[in-house]
Image: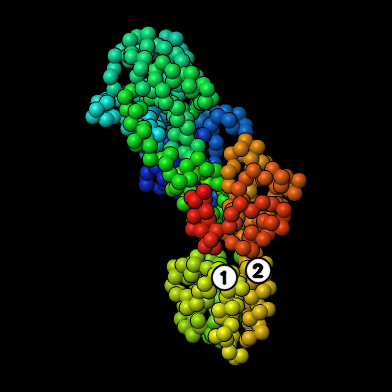
Amino acid sequence: MKGKVYLVGAGPGDYKLLTLKALQCVKEADIIVYDRLATDRILEDAKEGCEFIYVGKKSRYHTKTQDEINEIIAEEAKNGKIVTRLKGGDPYVFGRGGEEGEYLRERGIDFEVVPGITSAIGGLCYAGIPITHRDYASSFHVITGHLKEEEKELDWEVLSKISGTLVFLMGVSNLEKICNNLMINGKDKETPAAIINWAARSYQRVVTGTLENLYEKAMAEKIQSPSLIVIGGVVNLRESLNFFEEKPLFGKNIVVTRSRSQSSKLSEKIFDLGGNAIEFPTIKIEEISPNNELEEAINNLENFNYVAFTSENGVNIFVDKLYEMNYDLRKLAKAKIVAIGSATAAKLKERGLIADIIPSKYVGEALVEELAPMLKKEDKILIPRAKEARDYIVTELDKYCAVTEVKLYETVMGEGNKEELLELIEEERVNYITFTSSSTVKNLVKILGKENLDKLKDIKLISIGPITSKTIEEYGLNLYKEAKEYTINGIIDVLCNN
Ligand code: SAH
């Protein structure tokens, strides 16, 4: 196949500001070459086996030069690979996208450019600053603040006379110089000014002031790169247009400990509410395969008059197997379907099955209590579920009728990286850890090591329900709060209401 390079703008930070076209390039890529301004979250949409090459600063290896980056993308495309070169913001706004395109064209390599939302506009927007406004600015100017080469000095006289909004990129280290040059050349020192660090992310920080005092104020707040410098009357609108920082989870760093495949729902909600979801998979779901017991149960499905599902994973594995064995849902026609939890019921519905019985509480005890009075001696219940599930349901229901348990999957250790999490904790960049099952607690402890548990003492630990809470407490950890409703939404409620 012929290789190709997509030069793609990833937007300013919020991963949902990616365009549909950019998302398609991420999904198609064999290789994604990205830097630090492109949000990591975007990479999760890549196909299985996609290779990632980080070329940003603060690389664990060395920083790649522009020449090296050009070479990487060209070589890979020549080898027939689809290369997506992801850049923060828009590829043509100080992103050197033009140079990369020229380099590829010279070598006859096919490429396409996907514009993105530049931080110069979208970043300001997330700080509550519209780049133009009828009352304050009728033009805007995006300027490099990277003033290394003396001969390329900006024309300060001209810039000072402009009444439109001035936006400087790459200007943090020259902030003082930028403000001074504008004032020396006649710009009013009272002109509103702001600096926006890590725009459009939950850890966005904004300092506002005037041309005269912005530098001092920014230094006091230790504002670093990457930041946007904005000068102009539009800065004052932040007071009324600051929608992003008012989101309920803004500024909150929340660890999600579920398996990679399950965490997206919770993470997405956290991001939508302005928070920063840090995925740290403590568990991984591994289907038991081959599974003779499951096949036997499915072959004899008509013999069961109840089938009880206890998790979304269980539903998926069971229904997939049913189809794989060339049956369909009619095989379940005679059985009453029981679901523990609304998420399990929702998954059943998605797969074409409506649960007949959903116990009022999402724990095994409620299932037994509510199901037992209906059971007759000759009934047969099938319970397809996790290998490590508690014995409770099976032993209890067994007192009333015949129970067949089939183990579908096993929860094994997830790939969460100990050092990375400890570093985040050390830097006080973790406010909450969410636990959605006992195994997420157990495995987090295993990954971190008992000797590190006291490092969690200032972090708020949130549990999805009583069984998980009990496990948290058994390790001597402090439970902060338990969800009232034992679901992902229940956890979101706890996060939003404190
Ligand atoms: N192509 C990018 C700009 C690349 S130059 C775009 O269109 O946004 C890199 C500079 O962009 C940084 O030094 C900083 O000034 C700015 N920048 C990019 N993303 C940013 C963000 N999320 N928050 C603050 N500044 C950002």
Above or below: residue 306 compared with residue 56: below
Q: In the image, ligand 1 is in what quadrant?
A: top left
Question: Residue 452 in the image: x percent, y percent?
Answer: 72, 45
Q: What residue type is labelled 2?
A: Ala
- For the residues labelled 2 and 1, the Cα–Cα distance comes to 9 Å
Above or below: residue 256 compared with residue 424: below
Which numbered tag is attached to residue 413? none
Residue 138 is drawn in which quadrant?
A: top left
- Looking at the image, residue 459 sits to the left or right of residue 487; the answer is right
Question: Residue 175 in the image: x percent, y percent?
Answer: 46, 18
Would you call the spot at circle 2 few (<14 residues within 10 Å), some (14-19), or many (20 or more)?
Answer: few
Seen at 53% across and 46% down, the residue is 277
User: Can residue 85 be seen here?
Assistant: no
Q: What element carries label 1?
A: loop
Question: Residue 73 in the image: x percent, y percent?
Answer: 49, 35
Seen at 53% across and 66% down, the residue is 312
Which numbered tag is attached to residue 389? 2
Q: What residue type is labelled 1?
A: Thr
- Looking at the image, residue 138 sits to the left or right of residue 309; the answer is left
Marks 2 and 1 in Cβ contact (< 8 Å): yes
Disc 1 residue lies near ligand 1 with CB under 8 A: no
Q: Which residue lies under the disc numbered 1? A: 310
- Nearer to us in this view, 2 or 203: 203
- Looking at the image, residue 145 sits to the left or right of residue 319; the answer is left
Above or below: residue 237 compared with residue 487: above
Residue farthest to the front, as pictured: 498
Q: Which of marks 2 and 1 is nearer the N terminus?
A: 1
- Nearer to us in this view, 81 or 297: 297
Seen at 48% across and 28% down, the residue is 226
User: Can residue 148 be seen here?
Assistant: yes
